[in-house]
Amino acid sequence: MLQRLEQGDPQAADKLLPLVYDELRKLASAKMARESSDQTLQPTALVHEAWLRLGGDQQPSWQNRAHFFASAAEAMRRILIERARRRRAQRHGGGLQRVDVNDSALGIAAPEAADDELLAVHETLERLAQHDARKAELVKLRYFAGLTIEQAAEVLGISAPTAKRDWTYARAWLFKEINRSRHD
């Protein structure tokens, strides 16, 4: 289907979305399940917005399935980062007066914690990409798109054991860098 799309088949884009929609929705659902409870974006909306950012009916030429899903993961990541930044901006100003309340005493989770984590991972991931692009791509596929190790390995064209080693390294590297940047 990707090859037909690349060859200019005008009906290929219409046929592509139903083929990948369920898989994209599963990925979005897995990612959204890890988001804070105040998250108003639904998996379906995330998939639709990602599809539009990928080009909608005018899809670019995809080299292969891996290229498509890596691009979809990146689109979802950018959407979630933009939403977290908007919420953070509203919390830290936005024309409202700040009132301190002990959230734990009210029995509610602080939604800014999820946004702060998401933004910390995003910012640190940029540094990891400069250090090791493949490991950064693996993190994007796992953290932002919700792929399993096996799925991410397939997308990246590496073995599952290599993906597991890369994932272990990347998590440790990100953890160290996030903690370092929080204490600087």
Image (spheres, rainbow, N blue to C red):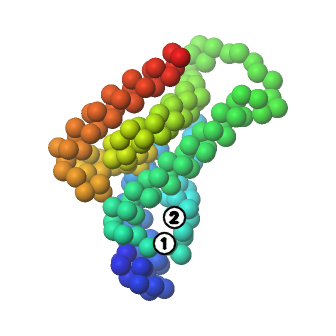
The numbered disc on residue 54 is 2
Name the residue nearer the viewer: 104 or 87: 87
Query: Which quadrant is the N terminus positioned in?
Result: bottom left
- Please state which of residues 184 and 142 is positioned toward the viewer in this rendering: 184
The three-letter code of the residue at mark 1 reads Pro
Neighbour tally class for label 2: few under 14, some 14-19, many 20 plus, Cα within 10 Å = some
Say which amino acid is labelled 2.
Leu
Where is residue 105? Give x, y as percent.
Answer: 59, 13
**Residue 89 relative to residue 174: left or right:** right
| Distance between the alpha carbons at the discs numbered 1 and 2 | 8 Å
The picture quadrant where one finds residue 93 is top right
Observer-side mark, 1 or 2, equals 1
- Image position, residue 79 (x, y; %): 56, 50
Left or right relative to 56: residue 159: left
| Residue at point 26%, 39% (across, down) | 166
First of labels 1, 2 by sequence position: 2
Q: Position of residue 130 (x, y in %)?
A: 42, 41
Locate residue 167 relative to residue 177 in the image: left or right: left
Tag on residue 87?
none
- Do the residues bearing badges 1 and 2 touch, measured as CB atoms within 8 Å? yes
Q: Quadrant of residue 112?
A: top right
Task: Residue under label 1, please give it.
Answer: 60
Residue at 47% over, 52% down: 74
Counting labels gives 2
Determine if residue 52 is in view. yes
Residue 142 in the image: above or below residue 151? above
Relative to 17, say whether 25 is above or below.
Answer: above
Name the secondary structure under disc 2.
loop
Q: At numbered mark 1, what does the secondary structure look like: helix, strand or loop?
A: loop
**Dot 1: within a 10 Å radius of its alpha carbon, few (fewer than 14), some, or many (20 or more) residues?**
some
